[in-house]
Image (spheres, rainbow, N blue to C red):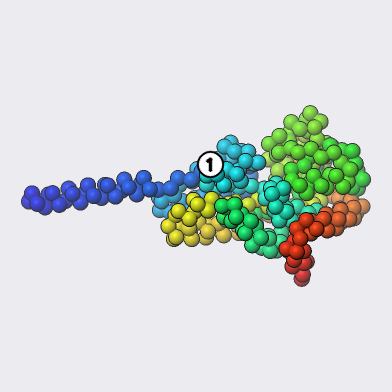
Amino acid sequence: MLSRRNLLAATGGLAATATIGRAEAQSAARWQMATPYADGNFHTRNIRTFIEDVQQASGGRLTVQLHSNAALLPMAQIKRGVQTGQVQLGEILLSAYANEDVFFDADAIPQLVTNYAQAKKLADLQRPYIEQRLARQGLSLLYMVPWPPAGLYAQQPITSIEGFRGLRFRTFNTATNRFAAIVGAQPTLVQSAELAQAFATGVVQAQITSAATGVDTSAWDYARVFTPLGFSMTKNAVMVSRRAIEALPATLQQDIRAAAARAEMRGYELSEEAQRSTEATLGQRGMQIVPPTQEMLDGLARVSRQMTDEWVSRAGPDGAKLIEDYRRT
Protein backbone atom coordinates (compact mmCIF):
# COMPACT_ATOMS: atom_id res chain seq x y z
CA MET A 1 0.00 0.00 0.00
CA LEU A 2 1.29 3.45 -0.89
CA SER A 3 1.96 5.84 1.94
CA ARG A 4 0.57 9.35 1.66
CA ARG A 5 4.07 10.65 0.91
CA ASN A 6 4.67 8.04 -1.80
CA LEU A 7 1.23 8.66 -3.27
CA LEU A 8 1.89 12.39 -3.48
CA ALA A 9 5.26 11.72 -5.05
CA ALA A 10 3.75 9.37 -7.61
CA THR A 11 0.87 11.66 -8.54
CA GLY A 12 3.22 14.62 -8.62
CA GLY A 13 5.48 12.74 -10.99
CA LEU A 14 2.53 11.92 -13.24
CA ALA A 15 1.44 15.55 -13.23
CA ALA A 16 4.95 16.69 -14.08
CA THR A 17 5.12 14.17 -16.93
CA ALA A 18 1.78 15.37 -18.26
CA THR A 19 2.92 18.98 -18.04
CA ILE A 20 6.11 18.17 -19.92
CA GLY A 21 4.12 16.27 -22.52
CA ARG A 22 1.80 19.24 -23.02
CA ALA A 23 4.74 21.61 -23.27
CA GLU A 24 6.44 19.41 -25.85
CA ALA A 25 3.23 19.17 -27.85
CA GLN A 26 2.79 22.91 -27.71
CA SER A 27 6.40 23.51 -28.78
CA ALA A 28 6.17 21.18 -31.79
CA ALA A 29 6.68 23.22 -34.95
CA ARG A 30 3.92 23.19 -37.55
CA TRP A 31 5.02 24.19 -41.03
CA GLN A 32 3.11 24.90 -44.21
CA MET A 33 4.50 24.13 -47.67
CA ALA A 34 3.28 25.43 -51.04
CA THR A 35 3.89 23.99 -54.49
CA PRO A 36 2.16 24.95 -57.75
CA TYR A 37 2.21 21.41 -59.15
CA ALA A 38 -0.46 18.71 -59.19
CA ASP A 39 -0.49 15.76 -56.79
CA GLY A 40 0.40 13.27 -59.52
CA ASN A 41 3.44 15.22 -60.71
CA PHE A 42 6.74 13.54 -59.88
CA HIS A 43 8.00 16.69 -58.12
CA THR A 44 5.01 16.64 -55.79
CA ARG A 45 5.36 12.92 -55.13
CA ASN A 46 8.99 13.49 -54.28
CA ILE A 47 8.03 16.27 -51.87
CA ARG A 48 5.55 14.02 -50.07
CA THR A 49 8.29 11.45 -49.46
CA PHE A 50 10.63 14.23 -48.31
CA ILE A 51 8.00 15.46 -45.84
CA GLU A 52 7.44 11.93 -44.53
CA ASP A 53 11.20 11.55 -44.00
CA VAL A 54 11.40 14.86 -42.15
CA GLN A 55 8.41 14.17 -39.92
CA GLN A 56 9.66 10.70 -39.04
CA ALA A 57 13.13 12.03 -38.20
CA SER A 58 11.62 14.78 -36.06
CA GLY A 59 9.95 12.35 -33.68
CA GLY A 60 6.90 14.56 -33.43
CA ARG A 61 8.83 17.82 -33.12
CA LEU A 62 7.81 18.97 -36.62
CA THR A 63 4.76 18.50 -38.84
CA VAL A 64 4.43 19.80 -42.38
CA GLN A 65 1.20 20.35 -44.31
CA LEU A 66 1.57 20.35 -48.08
CA HIS A 67 -0.62 22.56 -50.27
CA SER A 68 -0.25 21.31 -53.85
CA ASN A 69 -1.58 22.46 -57.23
CA ALA A 70 -1.31 26.17 -56.27
CA ALA A 71 -4.15 25.63 -53.78
CA LEU A 72 -2.64 28.02 -51.23
CA LEU A 73 -0.34 30.22 -53.33
CA PRO A 74 0.18 30.54 -57.08
CA MET A 75 3.71 30.08 -58.41
CA ALA A 76 4.43 33.80 -58.60
CA GLN A 77 3.70 34.25 -54.88
CA ILE A 78 5.41 31.22 -53.38
CA LYS A 79 8.92 32.58 -52.98
CA ARG A 80 7.63 35.76 -51.39
CA GLY A 81 5.35 33.66 -49.20
CA VAL A 82 8.37 31.84 -47.75
CA GLN A 83 10.25 35.11 -47.28
CA THR A 84 7.38 36.68 -45.32
CA GLY A 85 6.60 33.59 -43.25
CA GLN A 86 3.22 32.94 -44.84
CA VAL A 87 4.61 29.45 -45.47
CA GLN A 88 7.83 27.94 -44.19
CA LEU A 89 8.62 25.78 -47.23
CA GLY A 90 8.05 26.36 -50.93
CA GLU A 91 8.79 24.85 -54.32
CA ILE A 92 9.32 27.04 -57.37
CA LEU A 93 10.46 26.80 -60.94
CA LEU A 94 13.75 28.57 -60.42
CA SER A 95 13.92 30.16 -63.86
CA ALA A 96 10.53 31.81 -63.32
CA TYR A 97 12.35 34.21 -60.97
CA ALA A 98 15.08 35.21 -63.42
CA ASN A 99 13.83 38.80 -63.30
CA GLU A 100 15.22 38.87 -59.75
CA ASP A 101 18.59 37.37 -60.59
CA VAL A 102 20.10 36.11 -63.83
CA PHE A 103 21.67 33.11 -62.08
CA PHE A 104 18.22 31.63 -61.55
CA ASP A 105 17.82 30.78 -65.24
CA ALA A 106 21.16 29.52 -66.55
CA ASP A 107 19.46 26.14 -67.07
CA ALA A 108 16.84 27.74 -69.34
CA ILE A 109 19.31 28.62 -72.13
CA PRO A 110 18.25 26.47 -75.10
CA GLN A 111 20.33 23.30 -75.45
CA LEU A 112 22.93 24.30 -72.90
CA VAL A 113 21.72 21.22 -71.01
CA THR A 114 20.28 18.28 -72.93
CA ASN A 115 20.73 15.24 -70.62
CA TYR A 116 20.73 14.39 -66.92
CA ALA A 117 24.50 14.25 -66.50
CA GLN A 118 24.77 17.78 -67.90
CA ALA A 119 21.84 18.91 -65.75
CA LYS A 120 23.56 17.65 -62.58
CA LYS A 121 26.88 19.22 -63.55
CA LEU A 122 25.31 22.63 -64.15
CA ALA A 123 23.18 22.40 -61.00
CA ASP A 124 26.20 21.62 -58.82
CA LEU A 125 28.10 24.57 -60.32
CA GLN A 126 25.10 26.90 -59.91
CA ARG A 127 24.39 25.86 -56.34
CA PRO A 128 26.80 28.17 -54.44
CA TYR A 129 25.65 31.18 -56.47
CA ILE A 130 21.99 30.37 -55.82
CA GLU A 131 22.56 29.65 -52.13
CA GLN A 132 24.27 33.02 -51.66
CA ARG A 133 21.47 34.90 -53.38
CA LEU A 134 18.70 33.14 -51.47
CA ALA A 135 20.51 33.58 -48.16
CA ARG A 136 20.46 37.34 -48.66
CA GLN A 137 16.67 37.09 -48.94
CA GLY A 138 16.20 35.12 -45.75
CA LEU A 139 15.90 31.79 -47.57
CA SER A 140 17.87 28.57 -47.56
CA LEU A 141 18.06 26.19 -50.51
CA LEU A 142 17.24 22.59 -49.64
CA TYR A 143 17.42 20.81 -52.99
CA MET A 144 16.96 21.16 -56.77
CA VAL A 145 15.56 18.66 -59.27
CA PRO A 146 15.42 19.10 -63.06
CA TRP A 147 12.39 18.67 -65.25
CA PRO A 148 12.70 16.18 -68.11
CA PRO A 149 14.04 17.71 -71.36
CA ALA A 150 11.54 20.16 -72.84
CA GLY A 151 9.87 19.53 -76.18
CA LEU A 152 7.64 21.37 -78.61
CA TYR A 153 3.83 21.18 -78.60
CA ALA A 154 1.94 22.41 -81.65
CA GLN A 155 -0.97 21.62 -83.94
CA GLN A 156 1.30 20.51 -86.79
CA PRO A 157 5.00 19.65 -87.12
CA ILE A 158 7.37 22.63 -87.02
CA THR A 159 10.53 21.69 -88.90
CA SER A 160 12.69 24.79 -88.49
CA ILE A 161 12.94 27.79 -86.21
CA GLU A 162 11.48 29.87 -89.05
CA GLY A 163 8.26 27.95 -88.40
CA PHE A 164 7.82 29.82 -85.12
CA ARG A 165 7.50 33.17 -86.85
CA GLY A 166 4.17 34.82 -86.10
CA LEU A 167 2.93 32.02 -83.81
CA ARG A 168 1.37 32.90 -80.46
CA PHE A 169 3.94 31.20 -78.26
CA ARG A 170 3.45 30.33 -74.60
CA THR A 171 6.20 31.62 -72.32
CA PHE A 172 6.78 31.00 -68.61
CA ASN A 173 10.18 32.54 -67.86
CA THR A 174 12.65 35.13 -69.16
CA ALA A 175 14.43 32.65 -71.41
CA THR A 176 11.32 31.42 -73.25
CA ASN A 177 10.25 35.04 -73.66
CA ARG A 178 13.63 35.91 -75.20
CA PHE A 179 13.54 32.82 -77.41
CA ALA A 180 10.15 33.86 -78.75
CA ALA A 181 11.48 37.32 -79.56
CA ILE A 182 14.53 35.94 -81.39
CA VAL A 183 12.54 33.55 -83.59
CA GLY A 184 9.79 36.09 -84.32
CA ALA A 185 6.99 34.45 -82.32
CA GLN A 186 4.45 36.37 -80.25
CA PRO A 187 5.27 35.69 -76.55
CA THR A 188 2.34 35.10 -74.20
CA LEU A 189 2.83 34.39 -70.49
CA VAL A 190 0.67 31.44 -69.42
CA GLN A 191 1.02 29.30 -66.28
CA SER A 192 0.68 25.53 -66.61
CA ALA A 193 -2.71 25.42 -64.88
CA GLU A 194 -4.13 27.68 -67.64
CA LEU A 195 -2.69 25.88 -70.67
CA ALA A 196 -5.75 23.98 -71.87
CA GLN A 197 -7.91 27.11 -71.88
CA ALA A 198 -5.17 29.17 -73.54
CA PHE A 199 -4.85 26.73 -76.43
CA ALA A 200 -8.61 26.21 -76.72
CA THR A 201 -9.24 29.94 -77.04
CA GLY A 202 -6.32 30.57 -79.40
CA VAL A 203 -4.38 32.63 -76.90
CA VAL A 204 -1.41 30.39 -77.65
CA GLN A 205 -0.63 28.11 -80.60
CA ALA A 206 2.62 26.48 -79.51
CA GLN A 207 4.72 25.95 -76.41
CA ILE A 208 7.95 24.35 -75.25
CA THR A 209 7.76 22.37 -72.02
CA SER A 210 8.36 18.87 -70.70
CA ALA A 211 6.29 15.80 -71.49
CA ALA A 212 5.53 15.65 -67.75
CA THR A 213 3.77 19.02 -67.91
CA GLY A 214 2.01 17.81 -71.05
CA VAL A 215 0.57 14.86 -69.16
CA ASP A 216 -0.31 17.00 -66.13
CA THR A 217 -2.31 19.33 -68.39
CA SER A 218 -3.77 16.66 -70.74
CA ALA A 219 -1.93 18.12 -73.73
CA TRP A 220 -3.68 15.71 -76.11
CA ASP A 221 -6.81 17.80 -75.59
CA TYR A 222 -5.19 20.95 -76.98
CA ALA A 223 -2.20 19.96 -79.16
CA ARG A 224 -1.66 17.32 -81.85
CA VAL A 225 2.14 17.08 -82.15
CA PHE A 226 4.98 16.68 -79.65
CA THR A 227 8.58 17.05 -80.80
CA PRO A 228 11.22 16.03 -78.20
CA LEU A 229 13.75 18.80 -78.75
CA GLY A 230 15.92 18.51 -75.65
CA PHE A 231 15.35 22.26 -75.54
CA SER A 232 16.25 22.79 -71.88
CA MET A 233 16.07 21.11 -68.47
CA THR A 234 14.93 23.77 -66.06
CA LYS A 235 14.99 23.00 -62.34
CA ASN A 236 12.58 23.21 -59.47
CA ALA A 237 14.03 24.47 -56.21
CA VAL A 238 12.71 23.63 -52.75
CA MET A 239 13.56 26.29 -50.19
CA VAL A 240 12.92 26.97 -46.52
CA SER A 241 12.68 30.10 -44.43
CA ARG A 242 16.04 30.58 -42.68
CA ARG A 243 14.26 31.92 -39.61
CA ALA A 244 12.06 28.83 -39.44
CA ILE A 245 14.80 26.23 -39.87
CA GLU A 246 17.27 28.01 -37.60
CA ALA A 247 14.65 27.99 -34.83
CA LEU A 248 14.79 24.18 -34.77
CA PRO A 249 17.28 22.09 -32.78
CA ALA A 250 20.59 21.62 -34.60
CA THR A 251 20.08 17.86 -34.88
CA LEU A 252 16.69 18.34 -36.54
CA GLN A 253 18.18 20.87 -38.97
CA GLN A 254 20.74 18.23 -39.92
CA ASP A 255 17.97 15.66 -40.38
CA ILE A 256 16.08 18.01 -42.70
CA ARG A 257 19.17 18.63 -44.84
CA ALA A 258 19.90 14.90 -44.98
CA ALA A 259 16.32 14.27 -46.13
CA ALA A 260 16.75 17.03 -48.73
CA ALA A 261 19.92 15.40 -50.08
CA ARG A 262 18.01 12.13 -50.46
CA ALA A 263 15.13 13.97 -52.14
CA GLU A 264 17.50 15.46 -54.69
CA MET A 265 18.95 12.05 -55.59
CA ARG A 266 15.49 10.50 -55.72
CA GLY A 267 14.20 13.44 -57.76
CA TYR A 268 16.69 12.81 -60.57
CA GLU A 269 15.57 9.19 -60.73
CA LEU A 270 11.90 10.19 -60.75
CA SER A 271 12.58 12.79 -63.46
CA GLU A 272 14.22 10.21 -65.74
CA GLU A 273 11.35 7.82 -65.12
CA ALA A 274 8.87 10.62 -65.85
CA GLN A 275 10.58 11.40 -69.16
CA ARG A 276 10.11 7.82 -70.34
CA SER A 277 6.60 7.32 -69.05
CA THR A 278 5.12 10.70 -69.97
CA GLU A 279 6.45 10.71 -73.54
CA ALA A 280 4.92 7.24 -73.91
CA THR A 281 1.63 8.50 -72.47
CA LEU A 282 1.47 11.36 -74.97
CA GLY A 283 1.76 8.86 -77.80
CA GLN A 284 -0.76 6.49 -76.25
CA ARG A 285 -3.24 9.34 -75.98
CA GLY A 286 -3.04 9.98 -79.71
CA MET A 287 -0.43 12.69 -80.07
CA GLN A 288 2.05 12.43 -82.92
CA ILE A 289 5.62 12.09 -81.59
CA VAL A 290 7.72 13.69 -84.33
CA PRO A 291 11.54 13.74 -84.04
CA PRO A 292 13.21 17.12 -84.67
CA THR A 293 14.71 17.74 -88.08
CA GLN A 294 18.40 18.55 -88.42
CA GLU A 295 17.36 21.95 -89.73
CA MET A 296 15.50 22.60 -86.47
CA LEU A 297 18.44 21.43 -84.36
CA ASP A 298 20.89 23.59 -86.32
CA GLY A 299 18.63 26.60 -85.84
CA LEU A 300 18.33 25.94 -82.13
CA ALA A 301 22.13 25.71 -81.88
CA ARG A 302 22.44 29.18 -83.39
CA VAL A 303 19.88 30.58 -80.97
CA SER A 304 21.64 28.81 -78.09
CA ARG A 305 24.96 30.48 -78.89
CA GLN A 306 23.29 33.88 -79.06
CA MET A 307 21.36 33.41 -75.80
CA THR A 308 24.42 32.05 -73.99
CA ASP A 309 26.43 35.11 -74.98
CA GLU A 310 23.58 37.36 -73.87
CA TRP A 311 23.30 35.53 -70.55
CA VAL A 312 27.02 35.87 -69.84
CA SER A 313 26.83 39.57 -70.69
CA ARG A 314 24.08 40.03 -68.08
CA ALA A 315 25.68 37.79 -65.48
CA GLY A 316 29.13 39.36 -65.61
CA PRO A 317 32.37 37.69 -64.44
CA ASP A 318 30.56 35.14 -62.25
CA GLY A 319 28.41 34.12 -65.20
CA ALA A 320 31.42 33.81 -67.49
CA LYS A 321 33.12 31.61 -64.89
CA LEU A 322 30.02 29.43 -64.51
CA ILE A 323 29.77 28.77 -68.26
CA GLU A 324 33.54 28.25 -68.57
CA ASP A 325 33.52 25.75 -65.68
CA TYR A 326 30.49 23.99 -67.15
CA ARG A 327 32.07 23.61 -70.56
CA ARG A 328 35.36 22.38 -69.14
CA THR A 329 35.64 18.64 -69.65
Quick check: can you spot residue 173? yes
Q: Residue at image x 90%, y 53%? A: 299
Can residue 286 be seen from the camera position used here?
no
Q: Is residue 298 left or right of residue 259?
A: right
In the image, taking residue 4 as reference, residue 211 lies left or right, namely right
In the rendered view, does 108 fall on the left or right side of 134? right
Q: Which residue is mark 1?
A: 86
| Residue extending farthest bottom | 329
Q: Position of residue 124 (x, y in %)?
A: 66, 63
Q: Secondary structure at mark 1?
A: loop
Quadrant occupied by the C terminus? bottom right
Q: Given the image, on which type of amino acid does mark 1 rest?
A: Gln
Q: Is residue 202 above or below residue 59?
A: above
User: Looking at the picture, does residue 97 appear above or below residue 168?
Assistant: below
Of residues 49 and 74, the one drawn nearer to the viewer in this rendering: 74
Could you tell me residue 123's position as x and y percent? 68, 60
* Residue at x 85%, y 50% (from the top left corner): 291
Q: Position of residue 35 (x, y in %)?
A: 60, 43
In terms of image quadrants, where is residue 314? bottom right
